[in-house]
Amino acid sequence: MNYPNLPKDCTSMLCKHLTPEVFEILKDKKSAHGFTLEQIINSGLKNIDSGIGVYAGDQDSYAVFGALFDPIIEEYHGFGEEDAHKSNLNTDELNAPNPDPEGEFILSTRIRVGRNVDNMPLGPALSQAQRLEIESNIVSGLNTLEGELEGEYYPLLGMSKEVQEALIKDHFLFKEGDRFLDAAGLNREWPEGRGIYHNNDKTFLVWVNEEDQLRIISMQAGGDIKEVFTRLINAINSIGTKVPFSYSDHLGYITSCPTNLGTAMRASVHITLPNLAKDMDAFKAITDKYHLQIRGIHGEHSQSEGGVYDISNRRRLGITEVEAVQDMYDGVVALITAEKALR
Ligand code: ADP
Ligand code: ILO
């Protein structure tokens, strides 16, 4: 492979950090599971509008291709090569009384973590047989969950289009055909090996073999962030006794996209802020101050509809799970205060 032709107007972290020097160092390297630079950067080259543009094929990719991943991780998370990740799953330490008890602003709250199975390649480098083995092991573990977490697994293979589309529209299921994941190799042999587990109320869900091998999700209507967090932590602890998660002292939980490393946690609310939405500079000043990310109503790369936004923590690595949710909570309180002042 030769040094790629990166368009001048490309603003992704890939285009910024894949200098000719870095390319020369990495171009012939291979990770423990045989992942190459060409595979790592394919998504960002095929999708020149990417924000990041790289995916890892295994935990070892982060070490072998550190000359590219390290500056991206540093820029996204503010986390340096000498730093160590720390975890805190103690729900008592979260200070989050419902910021919207009247239900005027927050439609729903969702917190998810990504997890991958220890000693396996990540999704972009999985073989078909490995993906099926992972699905089978995860589902066996999920089928032992009890109480509020008890539910059923619904494989994507054989699911009717109507059911699939309704689950996507209602924000429960991942979408199909994402072009970023496609070019990363994450959609190979679709839909086999993928599926969703959920409890009866759809307040606890697990995505299997999407961008990460597990996405463990807790969600419900309204703004009781602590209840959502507590359910999630119970689920993580229970699943962790059945499925060994890939974890490193330096990078925390290992995920295929470097933005998800560390806690691998995204805590979000769907919130209606019609007045603040008319002044995006003021809106963004608050979200920047509290390290928040603004997404649209159907997730990443989607637009807001009717003044409703998906507001979540941006940082995931080098901060604890409690701090990640606290970032989101404190920012949401500030957004609601600003919205009320504009009424
Ligand atoms: P991820 O959260 O896994 O990074 P997305 O941004 O694609 O991925 O979101 C996945 C789905 O979760 C989308 O349908 C999105 O609308 C939904 N979602 C995210 N946050 C919330 C929320 N607070 N309430 C309801 N649905 C949500
Ligand atoms: N590869 C995409 C998405 C990056 C962050 N989001 C996720 C889903 N990992 C991009 O570079 O814009």
Image: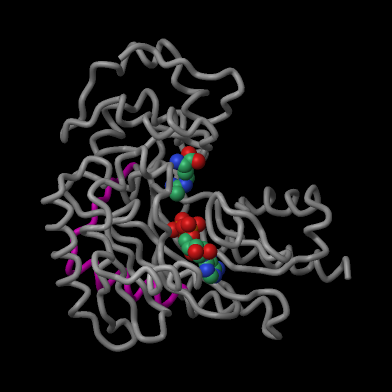
Let me know if residue 240 is in the magenta part.
Answer: yes
- Please say whether residue 266 is one of the residues in the magenta stretch: no
For the point 35% across and 66% down, which residue is it? Answer: 216
- Where is residue 292 shown, x and y percent of the image? 61, 53
Residue at left offset 23%, top offset 57%? 245
Magenta span: 229-250
The extreme front residue here reads 161
Q: Is residue 54 above or below residue 295?
A: above
Classify residue 173 as left or right of residue 136.
right
- Residue 218 sits in quarter: bottom left
Residue furthest to the bottom: 147
Q: Nearer the viewer, residue 92 or 141?
A: 141
Q: Which quadrant of the structure image shows residue 83?
A: top left
- Residue 234 horizontal/vertical position (percent): 34, 76
Q: Residue at x 70, y 68 (%)?
A: 333
Left or right, 332 with respect to 257, comes to right
Residue 310 point in image, percent of width and height: 60, 61
Q: Is residue 273 left or right of residue 324?
A: right
Report the number of numbered marks: 0
Q: Residue 232 at x, y = what percent? A: 39, 72
The residue drawn where x is 69% and y is 50% is 289
Q: How is the image coloured?
A: one colour
Q: Is 183 situated above or below 144?
A: above
Q: Is residue 320 visible?
A: no
Which quadrant does the C terminus fall into? bottom right
- Give 187 or 141, whichever is nearer the viewer: 187
Q: Which image quadrant: the N terminus?
A: top left
Q: Considering only vertical position in the picture, is 33 above or below 306? A: above
> Observer-nearest residue: 86 or 233?
233
Q: Is residue 173 visible?
A: yes
Specify the quadrant of the image occupied by residue 163.
bottom left
